[in-house]
Image (spheres, helix red, strand yellow):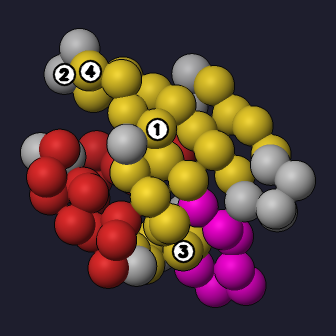
Amino acid sequence: MKPLVFIDHAEQRRKQRGFTSLEIEFVIERPQLLRKRADQRTEVVGVIKNRLVKVIYEEKESYLKIISVM
């Protein structure tokens, strides 16, 4: 898997919601729902510790740019 690079907004939201980078990586690798958006971003949904988490990211050549964690 490509390395994850969190923009400031996504890093702040990840911390606020109590998720680790490894948990976000897990959701991206094994999503329960995956949707390609019209803006070329990818939206994935998974479950961590009985909580739903949605991650929005852009795939770049050598990394995944994490836009938001909800």
Q: Amino acid at mark 3?
A: Lys
Q: Which residue is labeled 2 in the image?
A: 49
- Cα gap from disc 3 to disc 2, whole angstroms: 24 Å
Task: Name the front one of labels 1 and 2.
Answer: 1
Q: CA distance from mark 4 to mark 2?
A: 5 Å
The secondary structure type at the circle numbered 4 is: strand
Which residue is the site of mark 4? 51
Q: Earlier in the sequence, mark 1 or mark 2?
A: 2
- Label 2 neighbour load within 10 Å: few <14, some 14-19, many 20+: few
- Residues under labels 1 and 2: Cα distance? 14 Å
Q: Would you say 68 lies left or right of 63 here? A: left
Q: Of 18 and 62, which appears nearest the observer?
A: 18
Q: Is residue 36 left or right of residue 64?
A: right
Q: Which residue is mark 1?
A: 54
Quarter of the image where the C terminus is located = top left
| Above or below for 15 versus 65 | above
Helix, strand or loop for disc 2: loop
Cα separation between marks 1 and 3: 14 Å
Q: Residues within 10 Å of mark 3 (few under 14, many from 20)?
A: some
Give the farthest residue toward the right.
38
* Dot 4 amino acid type: Arg
Q: Which stretch appears magenta?
A: 57-63
